[in-house]
Image (cartoon, rainbow, N blue to C red):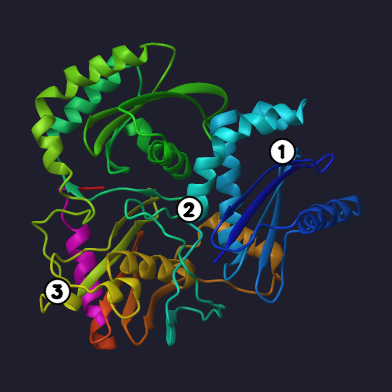
Amino acid sequence: MTVHVLCVTSAGGLPLFTRKKGDGESLPFSIVASLNGVHMFCKSQDVILQTTSTQDTTYVWDEFEDSIVLVAAASCSSEVILRKLLNAVFNSMLLLVGVDEIRNIRNPDRLKRELRVCYPLIDKLMDGVDGSSVNISTVTSHTSQSRNANACNERDSGESYFCGNLIGLSETLLCYESNDLLTCLDAYADCLNSQFACLLVSGRELIATPAWEDLHPLERQLLTLLTVVASPCTSSDTPVFLPFKSPSIPFRLVWVLLVPGVSVLGLCGPTPGLSEAEHLALQCWGSSADHLRSITQIAPRNFPHSIHLDVNVLGFLLINLDTGKYVLSYTANDKPVWHANDKPETVAERCNPINAPSASHRLHVLRTFYYQAAESLLLTQGDLDFVKKVKSDSVKESSALEAYWCSEYHKCHGIRRSTNVLCVLYGSSVPTHTMRLLSQQTLSILTTDKQLRW
């Protein structure tokens, strides 16, 4: 699968950047010019061009601030996902450049240079579009009102083990409440004269201050991804704008590595300096160093080892719609069913994830199930409003309650209860009717323990 994103100015169609993810070829200049030209022509005729599709590619246009036009092109991807990508790309530009520079483009060449700092973040967001080349033989949904959906197989372009990277949601961990870590975080935020602070484990939110929790989920995702794509270092100080909360006035994003795999983020003003922030972090967190090191053992399982799920659960994706957070575990059991005989994985098996679903393949399957089936469970009011704009008023939309996949090598089941959505990956030997009971049991284990934080 190949994903393209290009950005041009609205006024003259001057290209600002193009990005590509995947093994396909770059878009030739003639296609780039055509994509921009058809949008400009439609605009001159008071027509809003939103999307079009060819036999193997979907194209989506979106204009922001009457200043720039973003275009996404991808094979085997839906319009909804690509529109989310464009929105996230625009907000990543706001995060690092600010709305004023984009709204009033005085010097396109200067803006083009300033936007280069956004490239790593944009590339990481483009990773979140990809799914996996999974052989799907059956897709069944239980809905209050039926909805037909077109699905195609997607292939992931090498997603890192560290982050699930679902666009518009922030990744977190399930952990038991730790008063000493909360005390340290509050103390560090006070030292920074800030209300915004967050503790990260392998790029995932562990605990955060109330003000950080109140940020838009996409803001939280972009801020944490910014630390993931940054060059290796022990601390950093980056000026950032908050796309939803403060798109014109910058903050300082101060990041300090506490122990390998654990870092602390803070949004603050001109003071303190980076060296002082490092010293303050040492003061606030020094007594908890051993605790922080022990927490790193949670990832990539992403929930406490004291919690035991059914042996048939190979991985899960748990999403809370209220908070915009998700927990992704592709090693839900220390000894998955596929490797229960202790037979080591051969080189051939590692190269063929269909025959031997490794940890990376389980991640890909869960992501693909999320995009191709579970997204129908997750339509927010904003998504519904978009659907109403592009479809007939006579079409009635309703969200699904459950969905499942059955293939030759694995099965997936999704279930929604209240504001929680759980997607679970099983082996193909699990009876289809049993998945529902196991999913309900898993959701109960993960959500009823009031001491579990996420």
Residue linked to disc 1: 65
The residue at 32%/33% (across/down) is: 210
Rendered image quadrant of residue 203:
top left
Q: Residue furthest front?
A: 347
Q: Is 119 situated left or right of 336 in this image? A: right
Asked if residue 243 can be seen in this view, the reply is no
Determine whether label 2 and label 3 are within 8 Å by CB. Answer: no
Name the spot of residue 278 as percent of width and height, x first: 27, 18
Name the residue type under label 3.
Answer: Val
Residue at (64%, 52%) from the top-left corner?
5
* Label 1 environment density (alpha carbons within 10 Å; few <14, some 14–19, many ≥20): few
Q: Secondary structure at mark 3?
A: loop
- State the extent of the magenta-drawn residues as a range: 435-452
Q: Residue at x 43, y 16 (%)?
A: 269
Tell me the kind of residue under disc 2.
Answer: Ile
Q: The residue under label 1 is which amino acid type? A: Glu
Quadrant location, the N terminus: bottom right
| Residue annotated with mark 3 | 311
Q: Is residue 123 left or right of residue 267?
A: right
Where is residue 41 drawn, in percent x and y? 88, 54
Task: Estimate how packed mark 2 is, as few (under 14), some (14 to 19) or many (20 or more) residues with alpha carbons within 10 Å.
Answer: many
Q: Does 73 appear above or below 244? A: below
Towards the viewer: 31 or 265: 31
